[in-house]
Image (cartoon, grey):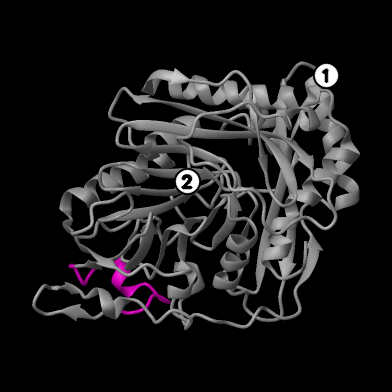
Amino acid sequence: MTVPVLPRLRVRTLAAPPVPDLFDLLPPDVDAASVVSWVREGSGLIGWGRAASSRTADGGRGGPDRFATAAQWWRDVVAGAEVVDEVDLPGTGLVAFGSFAFAPGSPDGGGLVVPRVIAGQHDGKAWVTSIEDLDLSTAADTEPGVSDPAPTDPAEGAPAAPDLLPAPGEAQSEPARGIRLLPGAVAPPDWPRVIRAGIARIAAGEVDKVVLARDVVAAADAPIETVDVLRRLADRYGATWTFAVDGLVGATPEMLVRLQHGRVRSRVLAGTVRRDRTPAPSVTEAHPELEDAHTPDPRLRFVSDAKELEEHQFAVRSVAEALAPHCAALEVPEEPFVLELPDVYHLATDISGEASDDATSLDLAAALHPSAAVCGTPSEAAARVIAELEGMDRGRYAGPVGWLDASGDGDWGIALRCGQLSADARSMRLFAGGGIVAASDPESELAETEVKLAAMRHALGLGS
């Protein structure tokens, strides 16, 4: 296996004017695979180009050590970087984006990438970060498909902020033509059979819960534009985190872990009910940030049947147990609240605590993965059942996706409601799954996956 080259990075963050839409800043000719995103309700980070990557030319860094390998690479990169940060907010300075395979044995192991340009904004403040590799012999500088480094300011030796950002509105593109949906590893009529097999494993006592997922292939006559997909997701699903890393594009409602100034937070989702509205609204209620406390939610009576509550309790317990060794005063609410999205209701619980060790956000994401929300309980047994029944490699679907900075702070979600773009951008694998417990109904589980696929169908311009 090829070992990734360790770069020497020069980083500078400067203040910039806020923009109505971060996605307007993406250059029109940007390589789709180099686009990164972490945006929620107009705030967050986008980037493009590639200054460095922990991924290798032979398909990534897989195996059970994939998180530890990336974490060590990041520590080494941070130690050798020259950083000037004139803004000093979460998401400024040296930042890496990452996504990791769900299963250790997946050939798409995942890893961290550092863009050449990052633009961000939050609470009325905006910035742009330029990153360049000082060693012209690194693989990042010769990587095919990556644009040349941004122009530099000779006086400072770093790219000047005004030169890095295209004028808003330049990044417009035509939607892909002739998109059609094709069956994935398991055709929809056969999916209830897979669910029945999962229920049988539960009845046999192998697992208490197992999360089973299926894929659908979106084939296009022209390249699928990442910017279009991101923009549609952000417009319709503003309460989620719209993400892109290495061609994995989606809008996740689930925050696996956030670490910021010593505070640890996680949003757990499990239990899904289709909205009883036709058509679904394009804009739902505003959702609080993770630091806001729970309040009693009267809508629980609409969605809290025994099956959904059981599934949710498994997921909350698994996250709380994984965070406990790294946190003091862990706060776990007694009951969930209802997260309202255009297509579904989710049962949700926000867990929080104070960090009690030096674990980074990536370390915490590794400790939490896989949670019961995407794997099952017990996790090792559930992972075996998944491998035996799903008939596909999930790749980075249902794995951690997000970003971290030089201090180790960052956000990591779970790659849900997403698709993996092919190398030629003319197809995308879409994924959806659901938690299976003893009370699950196979036909209802098929219907749930169709509802969850609605987000990416909409993102591809196929309606909801």
**Measuring 25% from the left and 43% from the top, which residue is drawn there?**
407
Q: Which label is found at residue 118?
A: none
Q: CA distance from mark 1 to mark 2?
A: 33 Å
* Residue 367 % position (x, y): 45, 30
Residue 238: percent from left, percent from top: 58, 55
Q: Main secondary structure of the magenta part?
A: loop
* Left or right: 198 as drawn, with respect to 119: right
Which residue range is magenta in the image?
134-148
Q: Quadrant of residue 122?
A: bottom left
* Residue 203, numbered label: 1
Q: Is residue 44 above or below residue 387?
A: below
> Mark 2 = which residue?
62
Q: Does residue 131 appear in the picture of this structure?
A: yes
Instruction: Label 1, secondary structure: give it.
Output: helix
Earlier along the polypeptide chain: callout 1 or callout 2?
2
Seen in the picture, residue 120 relative to 165 is either above or below; the reply is: above
Residue 463 location (% of width, % of height): 77, 66
Q: What amino acid is at disc 1?
A: Ala
71 relative position to 29: left or right: left
User: Which residue sits at x=47%, y=46%?
Assistant: 62
